[in-house]
Amino acid sequence: MPVNAGPEFMEAELEYQRATTPEERLLGLKKMLKTAPKHKGSEKLLAEIKKKIAKILEQQERVKQIAKRAGRASAGIKKEGAARVCIIGATNTGKSSLLAKITNSKARISEYPYTTTEPEIGVLDYIGIKVQVVEIPAIIQDFIETDSGSYFVSLMKESSLLIVLYRNEEERKLVRSELRKMRLSVPTIELSQQEAKERSQDVPWKIWKNLGLIKVYTKQPRKPKEFPPVSLGKGATIRDLATKIHKDFVQKFKHARVFGSSVKFPGQQVGLGHVLADDDVVELYTKD
Ligand SMILES: Nc1nc2c(ncn2[C@@H]2O[C@H](COP(=O)(O)OP(=O)(O)O)[C@@H](O)[C@H]2O)c(=O)[nH]1
Ligand SMILES: [Mg+2]
């Protein structure tokens, strides 16, 4: 405490001490600088405050640059299938094990930490719908600032869902805090290693439910529904379905018959604007 510090300074210092984010810390420090006594005896204090401010600004600039690079990085991995899902977590949390269980991937599973240094990719087949699953190397403190951090973050940014694996609260908190720093807006589900192991058969369903997609089957009149189903975004219409099947379909479209929860009765006739629901079965009729 410097000599002659007024109540305003003490308040600012308290604000700084209670701050939980760099932005709040910066605000507190700036107030401290403004309200600190300015005389010979406080020079050291002023220098210290300025140094702390500079450090935060530098850190903020670094994070900004990294985020920029991450955004630009054209991820070397091509996005394939209906969606991309990333498995993330601290080291040895069973990411490779889960990837191997739910996809065709032969990722290396090892008791040694940091075995996975490159993203591992597998394809999950959910009732014929292909979902790309990417294992991101272990999340560590300040992950975004590691050598390939921005590249991995760009892979995560371009995914539809993140699965966080953890063994204990500490690992769960670490990943949460690193995710906050990455400023992603990707839906996230957390799974304990135990859940992932004991209920691995439920994981594909859980992934599908959290992707925000629907699956729709097509069929010919008087024939059974066809596999695989077509994946569409929530709120998709008959027009979206027709476009996805064939670009000419919309021009030739006459009407459709729908069986499923989006219609009042099975086989109801609908037009291009009709909004589909998960598991609908659709017959498309064209003017030929
Ligand atoms: N006890 C236990 N060990 C597991 C489980 N899942 C994976 N392991 C082991 O933990 C180690 C790391 O697994 P791995 O899948 O490579 O983890 P990763 O580093 O997150 O990819 C291996 O020795 C696995 O056999 C689990 O559910 N329970
Ligand atoms: Mg691994």
Image (cartoon, rainbow, N blue to C red):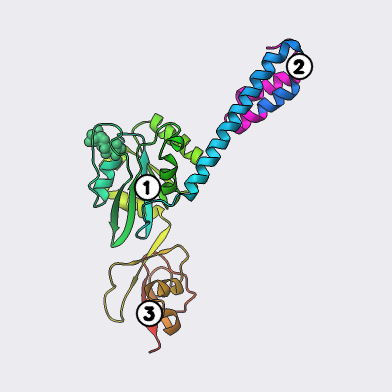
Residue at the disc numbered 3:
284
Drawn side of residue 205 relative to residue 176, left or right: left
Residue at the disc numbered 1:
86
Q: Mark 1 or mark 2: which comes first in sequence?
A: 2
Residue type, label 2: Pro
Q: Is residue 7 magenta?
A: yes
Placement of the C terminus among the 4 image quadrants: bottom left
Q: From mark 3 to mark 2, how far is it between C-alphas? A: 79 Å
Crowd rating for badge 3 (residues with CA inside 10 Å; few <14, some 14–19, many 20+): many
Q: Is residue 245 visible?
A: yes
Q: Secondary structure at mark 1?
A: strand
Q: Toward the viewer: 168 or 251?
A: 251
Q: Name the quadrant containing residue 81.
A: bottom left
- Residue furthest to the bottom: 288
Residue type, label 1: Cys
Q: Secondary structure at mark 3?
A: strand
The numbered disc on residue 178 is: none
Magenta region, mostly helix, strand or loop?
Answer: helix
Q: From mark 1 to mark 2, how far is it between C-alphas? A: 52 Å
Residue range highlighted in magenta: 1-27
Q: Quadrant of ligand 2?
A: top left
Q: How many marks?
A: 3
Task: Find out if the beta carbon at label 1 lies less than 8 Å from the nearest ligand 2 atom.
Answer: no
In the image, residue 210 above or below residue 196: below
Residue at the disc numbered 2:
37
Q: Position of residue 166 (x, y in %)?
A: 35, 36
Which one is closest to the eye, mark 3 or mark 1?
A: 1
Residue type, label 3: Leu
Residue sitting at x 70%, y 12%: 2
Q: Secondary structure at mark 2?
A: loop
Labels 3 and 1 touching (C-beta < 8 A): no
